[in-house]
Image (cartoon, grey):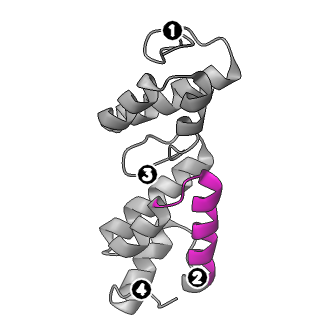
Amino acid sequence: MSDGFDPETDPVVSSRQATVHSAYTRLRARGEDEAANELRQAETLAEQTRIAREVKEFDPEHDSAQNSSQARIRSMYDALLEHGFEEEAEALRSGDTVNEQERHLAHLRAEWGVSTPTGVAEFADATGGEAASG
């Protein structure tokens, strides 16, 4: 690393380093060691920042919720899986940002008429576990 920043060991002293460190930490927590090492081994902080911005902000399969939006996404993701809506759960998970995931939840609310995990259960009961075609 030509600029000397190592997200594993160096203290964070700039916003760009914070971005890199946060992405590195998320990747390691998710078990994505190869991607974390790629981020760590990038030649410059600019390259590390570019890679870090491509890391999914919140992954409901692996991450703990840190705020109410993430908690809402996580609970709906879990409910979708629990009731057999794997495709819809993966579509929710596929959003790279919490905002994209929130938009997907808004789509589900509009299409299915559900806004809570309880609503997903009720929808599953009413439809026999069949997702509405979109």
* Residue 105 belongs to magenta span: yes
From the image, tell me which residue sits under label 4.
Answer: 131
Residue at x-position 45% and y-position 49%: 59
Question: Marks 4 and 3, how far apart in space?
Answer: 20 Å
Number of the label disc, if any, that sits on residue 10: 1
- The residue carrying pointer 2 sits among few (fewer than 14), some (14 to 19) or many (20 or more) residues within 10 Å by Cα, namely few
- The answer to whether residue 42 is above or below residue 92 is above
- The residue carrying pointer 4 sits among few (fewer than 14), some (14 to 19) or many (20 or more) residues within 10 Å by Cα, namely some
Task: Tell me the mark number nearer the camera, choosing from 4 and 1.
Answer: 1
Dominant secondary structure, magenta = helix
Residue at x-position 43% and y-position 73%: 88
The segment highlighted magenta reads 94-110
Number of the label disc, if any, that sits on residue 60: 3
62 displayed left or right of 116? left
Label 3 element class: loop
* Residue 12 belongs to magenta span: no
